[in-house]
Image (cartoon, rainbow, N blue to C red):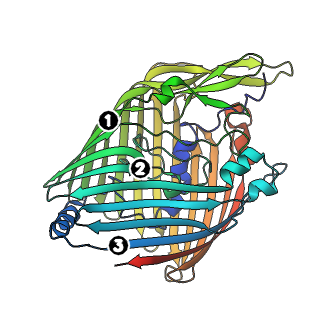
Amino acid sequence: MNNYHLFFFSTALLFSPLIHAYGADNLEDQFDFSDADTGFDFGDVEDTKKVAQWEEKGQALNLNVLIAAEWNFAYQMSAGHRRWVNLPIVPDTNWVIDWHSKVGTLYSEGNFLTNIAYTIEDDSQEVIDKYEKELFLRELYWKKSFDDYSFSTGVIKVMWGKADLLPVVDLISPSDQTKAIFARPEAARLGQNVQKFDLYWKQHQLNLLFIPYPRYNRLPEKGHPYHVFGGLDLYPSQEDDDREPEWAMRWNYASGPTDAAAFIGHVHNRDPLVFTKGDTTPWLEKHFTRFHFVGLSANFAKEPFVFKMEAAYSQTRPLQKFDIVMTPEMETQLIPSGFRTTDTLAVVIGLDYVSGLWGNITFELANHQNIDEYQDVLLQDNTNAAIHWSKNFLNDSLLTNLLFTTFSEMDNHIVSLHIKYRIDDEWANGLKITWLDTDDNNPLLANMQYMDRVDLTIEYTFSLFDQ
């Protein structure tokens, strides 16, 4: 059996947290999804009451349709692994539709992507057929608001964390990992099938979530440049088809400079747990299992600083297990062999510094601990750090961002420099360069050292309809 040694360089250990960290250069410059019901905004009690009043009067509050077109040209520049990664046929199109009426609010978010790089680089026909043109509906939900409560149902993004770079409590919504770490957070996040009830009173907010049929992380398939399973086919198990429902609950308190929350839930792992099947022709079978979690998060603002923390304790959380074998050529191979369960504790602390003179700085430090020590699981105890600096020049027309983050272990690094120039309110262009430095002796990370990349973007944003 071969091609296993690269089988899993993208998992909750790597890509899921890194999507947040790598996308940090867009913390202050993202496509505006502020109207989305993310569950992250805790100051929306008055807005909910306003919407309820408008809906009660039978007024169509407004119809907003926001369109963003982006040309993103991406080239992988590591020696021996150079290739085009993204070449749009037509600009990537992102949309947000937000309509308020007497019957409630209808919200939709999605995008249409094209990429001819797969054809130019002679990738497999299966990859070309699946990824050359993609249409995503990331959110689509209906929400009815009343004075002190609201109800939502549909596909909704749910982000409950306070951390910007290394979150540990965002366990509800899945993510799109087909762009590896290079997708912006808003492009990587996917909605979850949610029925959501929100209750507001004074400085308190209570969120109750029921997920009847959970959605999992979207992984790149066989033949994709960022494929994570070493060329083996991945098939669902019976339990994947018979998905069990999930639930979660969060209470939040916000008063003055303090914002704190506690939550509890019963959810599945979002990345698959993989078993190796077959003797002569190996293939992989994916599994998902539920676990309980409890968590805390808090922000405290004291100008010019914001202090933040997150902590999540998971009970009997499943961790990918693997067997280590040696090939006749004396190469190390990792054979996925199911999973083990253990309680885990993850904590992140952070500090934001905001300065008009020096720019904005975010620093976060995260630690993950397995209560039971297993040497044959993918996610080991680890500590990671990330720091992000941003500053605007030329009357906020020139935006500069610099990110440094570690992953898996402190000696694996990502450095990203992003410069963006706003020509006017509609047009902007940008240049991003990303370097990765990984442990050569770690087979899990072997492929990532060849993913250095440069991106050139041209963006055009406009409101198609605003009433």
Q: Position of residue 140 (x, y in %)?
A: 40, 55
Q: Quadrant of the C terminus?
A: bottom left
Q: Identify the mark nearer the N-term, 1 or 3.
A: 3
Amino acid type indicated by mark 2:
Ala
Helix, strand or loop status at disc 2:
loop
- 270 or 26: nearer the viewer: 270
Q: Which mark is residue 247?
A: 1
Q: Nearer the viewer, mark 2 or mark 3?
A: 3
Query: Disc 3 designates what residue?
Result: 63
Nearer-the-camera pick, 430 or 130: 130
Image point (30%, 48%), residue name: 298
Give yes or no for contact between labels 1 and 3 (Cβ–Cβ under 8 Å). no
> Badge 2 is on which residue?
163
Local SS, label 1: strand
| Quadrant in the picture for the N terminus | top right
User: Does residue 286 appear in the picture of this structure?
Assistant: yes
Work out how far the residue at label 2 is from the one at label 3, CA to CA, in angstroms. 32 Å
